[in-house]
């Protein structure tokens, strides 16, 4: 885990989230605590519906929390007095489904944020967008529209768009879930290249255990609902990383460690579903 003076440290302390407390009273997150270091790639894994996205949405300012607090670099984002965090450019989300404007080129999509926020002039934003797209291997398609490029290129452009405002935290909710294995592999290496340049803190939700170990500094395995930290797999594999890592014994051992923890929780989730249906 990076330990220098970078910004982007996230502190999740005793967070609880109850949906519809006056009605069905669904306990989604229960007394969950997690410390994420500045510049860390923190991978969040667990059964479907366990509450992973609820945590991400609380950090982003999309959902309120019920109890506990979340801090960014020591400053409170949300707590019991202010249950909903303010949304800000310091935390940027990339969701499962593409969010590029189809009527804008990739270059204009990337330049849109700083232009609207007024942090850069139109010319400056476009120049920075082109430079960042070129760094991400997309310089030749900057004038193409999202529908004219591959899904991998479009997704890479989305991440560049998220990074152009120099956020402290990049929040990724299964961004590569629908991709085939080859495209996903290419996207993993592209994300690592961008991370090596920016060292932005990454909070990344995934169901793919190989993805979690390949990308992460830690893989945090969550319990079935209600969400709590079950175990943390430390990935002490040096960076930079490339696809050769996937065939190493160290990598396979870490994947198996995470798989054992996730499988146990998946069984609990399945059994709970069976009881609900009975």
Image: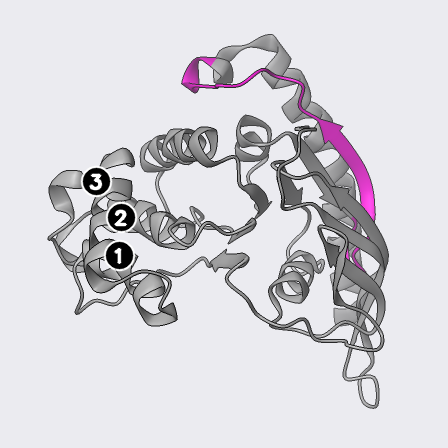
Say which residue label 1 marks: 125
Q: Position of residue 79 (x, y in %)?
A: 81, 69
Image depth: mark 3 or mark 1 in front: 1
Q: Which mark is residue 238?
A: none
| Callout 2: SS | helix
Residue 207 visible, this orientation: no
The overriding secondary structure of the stretch rendered in magenta is: loop
Image location (x, y in percent) of residue 44: 65, 45
Asked whether residue 265 appears in the rendered view, the answer is yes
Give the residue drawn at x 31%, y 60%: 120
Mark 3 residue element = loop
Picture quarter with the N terminus: top right
- Residue occupying the far bottom of the picture: 22
Q: Are marks 2 and 1 in contact (CB under 8 Å)?
A: yes
Q: CA distance from mark 3 to mark 1?
A: 16 Å
Q: Residue at x 66, y 34 (%)?
A: 5
Whether residue 278 is situated above or below residue 254 in the rendered picture = below
In the picture, the quarter occupied by the C terminus is bottom right
Q: Is residue 238 magenta?
A: yes
Is 245 in the magenta?
A: no
Tell me the crowding category of disc 1: few under 14, some 14 to 19, or many 20 or more residues within 10 angstroms, Cα based.
Answer: many
Secondary structure of the residue carrying tag 1 is: helix
Query: Which mark, residue 128?
Result: 2
Whole-angstrom CA distance, mark 2 to mark 3, is: 13 Å
Residue drawn at x 42%, y 19% as measured from the top left = 243
- Please give the range of residues in magenta: 223-244
Circle on res. 138 = 3
In the image, taking residue 202 as reference, residue 156 lies left or right, namely left
- Quarter of the figure with residue 103: bottom left
Q: Residues within 10 Å of mark 3 (few under 14, many from 20)?
A: many
How many callouts does the rendering have?
3
């Amino acid at each position: 885990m990076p330990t220098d003076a970078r910004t982007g440290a996230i502190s999740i302390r005793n967070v609880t989230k109850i949906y519809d407390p006056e009605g069905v009273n669904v306990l989604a997150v229960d007394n969950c605590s997690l410390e994420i270091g500045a510049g860390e790639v923190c991978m969040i894994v667990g059964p479907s519906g366990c509450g992973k996205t609820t945590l991400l949405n609380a950090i982003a300012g999309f959902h309120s929390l019920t109890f506990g607090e979340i801090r960014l670099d020591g400053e409170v984002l949300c707590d019991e007095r202010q249950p909903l965090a303010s949304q800000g450019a310091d935390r940027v989300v990339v969701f499962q489904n593409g969010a590029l404007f189809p009527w804008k080129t990739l270059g204009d999509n990337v330049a849109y944020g700083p232009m609207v926020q007024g942090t850069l002039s139109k010319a400056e934003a476009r120049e920075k967008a082109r430079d960042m797209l070129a760094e991400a291997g997309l310089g030749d398609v900057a004038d193409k529209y999202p529908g004219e490029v591959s899904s991998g290129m479009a997704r890479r452009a989305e991440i560049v768009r998220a990074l152009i405002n120099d956020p402290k935290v990049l929040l990724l909710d299964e961004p590569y879930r629908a991709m085939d294995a080859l495209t996903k592999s290419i996207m993993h290496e592209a994300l690592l290249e961008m991370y090596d340049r920016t060292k932005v803190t990454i909070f990344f939700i995934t169901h793919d255990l190989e993805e979690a170990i390949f990308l992460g500094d830690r893989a945090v395995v969550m319990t079935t609902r209600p969400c709590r930290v079950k175990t943390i797999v430390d990935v002490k594999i040096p960076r930079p990383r490339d696809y050769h890592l996937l065939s190493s014994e160290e990598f396979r051992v870490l994947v198996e460690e995470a798989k054992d923890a996730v499988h146990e929780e998946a069984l609990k989730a399945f059994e709970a579903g069976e009881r609900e249906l009975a």
